[in-house]
Image: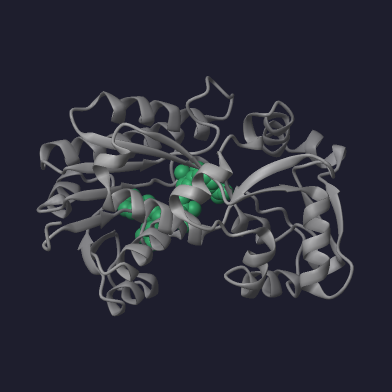
Amino acid sequence: MDHTEEFLVFGATGQQGGAVARALKAKGKKVRAFVRNPESTKSKALAAEGISLAIGDLFDPASIDRAMVRISGVFSVQTSSPAGEISDAQEVVQGKAIADSAVRQGVRHLIYSSGGAAGKGPTGMGHFDSKSEIEAYVQSLPMISTITRPASFMEMMLLPGMGLPQGEFTFFMRPDQSMQMIALIDLGRINAEILMAPDRYAGKIIELASASVTGKDLERAFTKAAGRPIAYKRFSEELLANNAFLNRLAELLDSGLLAGRADLSALDKVFGHLTSLEEWLGGAGKPLFEAALNREGTEVALR
Ligand SMILES: NC(=O)c1ccc[n+]([C@@H]2O[C@H](COP(=O)([O-])OP(=O)(O)OC[C@H]3O[C@@H](n4cnc5c(N)ncnc54)[C@H](OP(=O)(O)O)[C@@H]3O)[C@@H](O)[C@H]2O)c1
């Protein structure tokens, strides 16, 4: 392996990119993070961990080109419309801009981090269909690429408004319905492994998840972790009727599309032990879970 090999990670001040950048760093790799603001607390934390910063903006292709110089592998992720900053069309522009720049700069390999609902036909959700479009574009380019499709993040369950302070937890699945989820720590290390073995994963599309979880599993695990009863309920019909976004997600779960198609035993064999819900609650998820239990407020902030 080339000892000068360096990886460029987009979204490194965010959830996915942060996990990937840190996993690469933990494996002794040189990592460059593409950041908008080098003075932000999160950028400074990356720099303090020995990750170099390339300053730019996804709307500025020249800044992406500058960041790509002498890079061998890229982790590409974009925000999506539910986060409120960009439209679905802009997500596509950004995803394509990274891929185009990687080709221009002769980067050897790129991972495009998509989503579990992508690549399976139109979904009626703009931020899923945008990912299908970026996937197809990336695959059409003259460059080695891998598409990873992460399931819903376990971390997302602990956003405000799911009822934990009131001793309940409301989410998408019915009590006996399962949905795959991924712990960000697994997302980080699996994508890092893929970046480190580009030939092995060239041209592959890999659905990523850590565990398959039902509503009852959540009730059991959350009750144990909280040390007091946490009752599980699916989002109420009333909430779903008044929230088209959540309603469509629930429909996609019912139709099987959002339930997840990752082959958990194959992932475990290839990438090593996957984090179970209980392990996550006792590890990386513990501070988040405790904060969510003690948080005020009930507004649903899912995205
Ligand atoms: N939530 C889930 O369960 C789930 C599951 C599968 C897939 N996804 C997908 O994951 C993606 C979001 O990933 P995430 O949660 O890791 O994101 P995140 O935590 O919201 O972080 C977004 C990152 O993108 C950076 N960024 C935003 N706009 C930028 C721009 N114009 N130029 C350069 N950098 C920019 C942000 O940098 P700053 O620090 O400068 O803001 C930040 O580092 C979405 O596409 C979503 O659909 C989510």
Rendered view: 43 above or below 159 = below
Residue 162 shown left or right of residue 75 in the figure: right
Query: Which residue: 51% across, 35% down?
Result: 127
Query: Which residue: 76% across, 57% down?
Result: 162
Residue 211 image point, x, y percent: 63, 50
Residue 294 shown left or right of residue 26 in the figure: right
Of all residues, the one furthest to the bottom in this rendering is 48
Residue 129 image point, x, y percent: 49, 27
Residue 86 image point, x, y percent: 43, 42
Q: Quadrant of the N terminus?
A: bottom left
Rendered view: 239 above or below 88 = below
Residue 83 showing in the rendered view: no
263 or 170, nearer to the observer: 263
Residue 53 shown left or right of residue 118 in the figure: left
Residue 232 showing in the rendered view: yes
Query: Which residue: 71% across, 26% down?
Result: 255
Residue 87 image point, x, y percent: 45, 37
Residue 28 occupies quadrant? bottom left
237 or 109, nearer to the observer: 109
Residue 167 occupies quadrant? bottom right
Residue 123 shown left or right of residue 148 in the figure: right
